[in-house]
Image (cartoon, coloured by chain):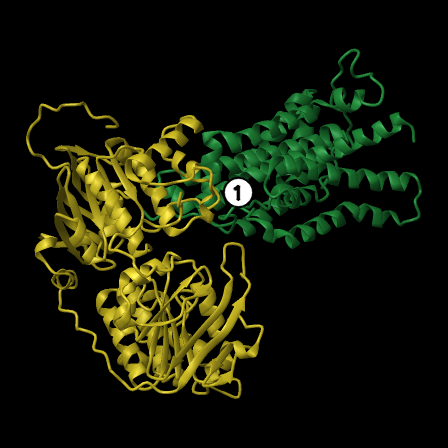
Chain colours: A yellow, B green
Amino acid sequence: MASLPGSPSVRTPAPLVAIRGLSKSFGPVHANRNIDLDVLAGENHALLGENGAGKSTLVKMLYGLLQPSAGEILWQGRPVVLGSPEAARALGIGMVFQHFSLFENLTVSENIALVLPPERQSRLDARIGGLSERYGLKLEPARPVWSLSAGERQRIEIARVLLQDPKLMILDEPTSVLTPQESESLFAILDRLKAEGRALLYISHRLDDVRRLCDRATVLRAGRVVGTCDPRAETARSMAAQMVGAQIAEVSSRGGAVGAERFAADDLSLPAPGLHATALRGIHLSVRGGEVLGIAGVAGNGQDELFAALSGERLASDAGAIRIDGRPAGRDGITARRRRGAAFVPEERNGHAAVPGFALSDNLVLSRHATGEVSRGGFLRGAAARAIAREVVETFDVRAGAPDPAARTLSGGNLQKFVVGREILREPGVLVINQPTWGVDALAGAAIHQAILDLAGRGSAVVVISQDLDELFRLCDRLCVIHDGTLSPATATAETDRDDVGLRMAGTVPSPPAGTEVASAPVHAH
Amino acid sequence: MNPDMIQLVLVGVVTAATPLFLAALGELVAERAGVLNLGVEGMMVMGAASGFAAAYLTGSTLIGALVGTAVGALMALLFGLLTVVFAVSQVAAGLALTIFGLGLSGLVGSAFVGLKRDAAPHLAIPGLTHLPVVGRLVFGEDYFVYAALLLALAVSHGLRRTRAGLVLRAVGDNHGSAHALGVPVRSVRLLAVLFGGACAGLGGAYLSLSYTPFWSPEMTAGRGWIALALVVFASWRPWRALGGALLFGGATVLQLQAQAFGIGLPGQFMSAVPYLVTLLALVALSLRRRAGSVAPAMLGTAFVPDR
């Protein structure tokens, strides 16, 4: 199975890969049911679907990482068994993973060598250099991965696949951590691959990217194929509706009057808390009541450190570095800041915002214990906590299987609605929220966006930290960009655009006469 | 002190360092693959008991060493089944392995307490071994010492320059990624754990065959724990582990010498010196930890593939 008998005389237009009746279940959960899918040679084929629709399970079976429970895979018309990634690679299937499959402490060339047959280091380095000429994929073979940006890491993944000379390349959410400019240079590479006759199976929730790249799209919902479409003949909205199976409500903005400053950081600087962490340098921000301030940035540029400093998980060295309603709060811990009307939603739902094994009511106590409703004299008031948890569940439409279930039993979107609702129901004067809809399905995402806008409409100040530019442009009145621990001044959302923000995310200050042509990520200027 | 006495002391240092180094080298490989095996002491002491028993019964030091090595690997297999295959907590399983090994070795060795053998043979090269000052130190060690050095060479080269070493480091750095690329994570870990056990068993056999050629219960006396500390001290690099082992060996010999010379400190305090050195070295190391990432990122984390 490893090598195919070369038979170019077969001139039937058999698809490069044909999936027939493929199913996969994990115990009682059916991740994929009876899936049919064809990818033709030289075709860019999109795989669309909500989180949990079964896209990743499907491509893992194609890459030999999971074995199907039923059904078969035909490669160039012949049934194949993909028992391992090696078998898939030997046929010519390569995969670029959503969460990078890289090794932080190995060098670029070691990372690449791992998936290739053994060869001399010098020869491999030369071949990596060749990719740079052919596709514009610039890589430094001797650098350790931990020192690289998300865009550079993705180039390693792509180089790794290209050096295997694949016929079919699977890309799982390749642009979710890239700046718009980095995405553009990725698309340029993908265009060249297509011109070489390679097929692409492209998973993305960025429907505009899909429309830009793909010839055909297959839509999955709840593990089944629900339709095929030509992305160029659809709109992003019509494709989203197919994915969700319902129209997504348009988020409506409130246009509330902007009041006095409620939350501010003034020359906030903190050293890096750990080895691969980022130091904060001279952060200034100011949010007024009724306003949503967005903070854009590529992951790992200090977002988590900034969130920890704003929430009080890490204290500033100077009390005046953080102000809540005009009074210094830099030396107050998270509990003291909550008592003063601030609320915080961290990025990681499981383990940071919520304890996975705790019931929702216990998780409610964790962020409400200091503000009076759920404890008296050091004793917990279980009934009160359960009542408020129930109120959060009802108000924010959290779908749970049991009355007061453990947090880990909720789906990502439902748990996120709970942790956001838990804070918003308190009517905080200040809300700081990190990646509000990361990994959340579109319906839950729209509900969270609406809740944030409604809160601001009632006079609260909101800070949204996010990597998702669509989300920021939808929610925010003003935008700033975090890069390498420094925060740019805020600009009104109406007066900026994605290209401008994207350049600042990559650390470039846009020069005034910038034409339409945008250079690829300016990391290795020669 | 004349030069020959200095040589005698240095030979003692090498002898004290060798069992520590062998055990640390094996544990280093296991940890580079991401498995923390706290059972080194238990594997060593089993190697010592079974190695002595086999050598006494067959009259062959070589067979004793081989049996000690195999028994160490067998203990590691038990640990590997628990932690790598069944994903039991590595800390709990490691501690249990140590307690189990100390107990079982007492049983295995009970018939051999008080028996003596001749010490393991030493290298003898006519003309070289009898050179003054350095002859015995360089050309007259027992065979275990040279075997340990060859092993260090192989491990160091293997980790850095071979495909197998690259795969092993990858598994220790990110087992999820390694699995996604098709690396058999659990097989790699099991092999690394077995290698660690074999080295610990050999180190233990060295104690009962060469260091003091008899068996006494719990004769490892905490050397397995020192070997564990050595791995951290060496920041997971083989040659640094050699340096560390010589340092700790030196501390051991120093306390013996000091007692012999009647230095006015209580013997109990001097016996504690190697362990104090261990503690100080670990503290010093964690103070400069910020300089660079050293520990394998997956150290101590079990891998369970989703199937």
> How many residues crowd around disc 1 within 10 Å: few (fewer than 14), some, or many (20 or more)?
many
Please say if B272 is above or below A428: above
Please say if A403 is above or below B236: below
Q: Is residue B106 left or right of residue A456?
A: right
- Residue in the picture at 54% in, 58% down: A274
Quarter the C terminus of chain A occupies: top left
Residue A34 position, x and y percent, is 14, 49
Q: Residue furthest top?
A: B126
Closer to the camera, A146 or B268? A146
Chain under callout 1: B
Q: Is residue A169 left or right of residue A463?
A: left
Q: Residue furthest left?
A: A12
Residue position marked by numbered label 1 in the rendering: B79
Closer to the camera, A505 or B35? A505
Mark 1: which amino acid?
Answer: Phe
Residue A137 position, x and y percent, is 33, 40
Residue A188 position, x and y percent, is 24, 45
Please say if B138 is above or below A135: above
- Residue in the picture at 43% in, 27% down: A122
Report whether residue A2 is seen.
yes
Please say if A360 is above or below A184: below
Q: How many marks?
A: 1
Looking at the rendered structure, the secondary structure element under dot 1 is helix
Closer to the camera, B202 or A419? A419
Q: Is residue A297 left or right of residue B136?
A: left
- Residue in the picture at 55% in, 52% down: B92
